[in-house]
Amino acid sequence: MSENRETMKIAVVGKGGVGKTTISALLVKVLSKKGKVLAIDADPAGGLSAALGVKVEKTLEDVRNEIVNMIRERYDKVEVASSVDYKVLEALHEHEMFSFLAMGRPESEGCYCQLNSMLREAIEFLSTSFDYVVIDGEAGIEQINRRVMRSADVLLVVTDTTKKGFHVANQIRSVAEKAVMFRRCALVVNKVREPLEVVSKDFDSVFLVPEDEVIFEFDVEGRPLLDINDSPALRSVEKMVKTLLSSEGDLLA
Amino acid sequence: MFEEVVERIRAYLEEGLKRGSIHEYHPFSFKSWDRGRDVVTRHDLAYEMGRQDSALLILWGRAENKAYISASSDGSLAVIVVCDVAWNGLERYECFKALREAFYGLNLSGVTIRALPSQAMVWLRVSKEASAKGFSLGVFARAVVEAMNSVGFVRATDVILLTSREEIKALKDVFNRAKKIADALIKMHEEKVLNCEECDYKDVCSEIPELKMIRDKIVRKS
């Protein structure tokens, strides 16, 4: 990790279908030119792996299940803690441009609060080795908070241009206010077709990302978004990153 | 408890020393290394060892603060730690737990050490920075000796680092035997009621006198 730099954690949330995963993948692409990136797919649907061209071999849910089985046979705190650290590192997919962790779909029954905490701590500790962490989440941040990390520096709430989308974004924002620690919350309006003015006092900033034929083509062809060289959406995300990094720099200073 | 295992490892070491495939060192001749928890990722990775082709044994027996390291490496890693223990009434299981915690608690700056106890696997990742600053298996051996010797009842520690698949394969039976003994010890202390007739560890518990004694004591108590 670059010296004297704190890890910047960006959580991307929003209603299904608004393009969270696209925004996350483009963020990974842009940020990977600036430093070490850990991409975390926290959406059980698991779209970020495809958007980044990653073949997932092991998810954190697999790790959790392996440890749960181990606990069923024999519980030993030292062994469990050691195994969690080993298996989380094993689940890390290391790409040339970024590293990747898939949370997977929660399946196992029963409450293993201590194990969940150990897993979250292992992810949080792993993240300290990176300059940036991008978390592609579900609609709300509560699940990220419970399973991935206790806090984020930037919460990006993604919406499309529909009234319903804005309504859900505002709801997510107000729930997040009570549930999670974050320093900055921005609204990302995705798939914008025509000039649009968005004023919102609930968000620290608003970013517009245009609807993009290139993204559409890549999605149709199943090609990873990392391969996009230039497109309107990518340029918007580059601008967004520039703004976030300068404002985050101010916050960290 | 581990006498037979340690003797077989020592016999293997003697052969290796004669052949020149294993070298003996004084661990304190290597530099001391700062402690620190780091996850070494691909971008910073100089080299990694172990993981699939690995073994980890923490045993007690005769030891004199020595390090034994293979002359050549193919990325495999077996870490064998033998501690000379001052028993003074110390329970075997308490000793086992303390030694294990001392090893698992070892964190070195610029290095990631991971252990998977259930499969006796170990994984070492060394950063470019640590490698450039002189981190080596000798430095690792010294750090292990220091960590183990910091346990109150440990008088001395030998660390054996085997770094080829062939060596690990040659000692496979010994590793399996040691793991079975350790697993039997854990099982005896974690199961409230022992059903020895149907237990997978019946053989080692019947053969190893110390395990037999512990088992008899637990059975008498229950």
Image (cartoon, grey):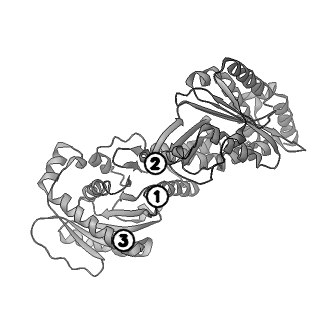
- The structure residue drawn at horizontal position 18% and vertical position 60%, both measured from the top left corner, is A235
Residue type at mark 2 is Leu
Q: Number of numbered discs present?
A: 3
Residue type at mark 3 is Glu
Q: Alpha-carbon neighbours of circle 2 within 10 Å: few (<14), some, or many (≥20)? A: many
Give the distance between the C-alpha atoms of the residues marked 3 and 1, in whole angstroms.
25 Å
Residue type at mark 1 is Arg
Q: Which residue is mark 2?
A: A60
Q: From where the camera sits, is residue A75 visible?
A: no
Q: From where the camera sits, is residue A163 visible?
A: yes
Q: Nearer the viewer, mark 3 or mark 1?
A: 3
Give the distance between the C-alpha atoms of the residues marked 2 and 3, in whole angstroms.
29 Å
Could you tell me residue A245's position as x and y percent?
32, 67
Q: Alpha-carbon neighbours of circle 3 within 10 Å: few (<14), some, or many (≥20)? A: some
Q: Which residue is mark 3?
A: A248
Host chain of mark 1: A
Could you tell me residue B15's position as x and y percent?
71, 18
- The structure residue drawn at horizontal position 36% and vertical position 63%, both measured from the top left corner, is A11
Look at the image and tell me in which quarter the C terminus of chain A lies.
Answer: bottom left
- The structure residue drawn at horizontal position 35% and vertical position 59%, both measured from the top left corner, is A138
Q: Is residue A186 left or right of residue B13?
A: left
Labels 3 and 1: the sequence-earlier one: 1
Host chain of mark 3: A
Could you tell me residue B104's position as x and y percent?
65, 46
Look at the image and tell me in which quarter the N terminus of chain A lies.
Answer: bottom left
Give the distance between the C-alpha atoms of the residues marked 1 and 2, in whole angstroms.
10 Å
Q: Kindly indicate whether the residue at mark 1 contacts the one at mark 3 (C-beta within 8 angstroms).
A: no
Q: Let me know if marks 3 and 1 both belong to one chain.
A: yes
Q: Which residue is mark 1?
A: A147
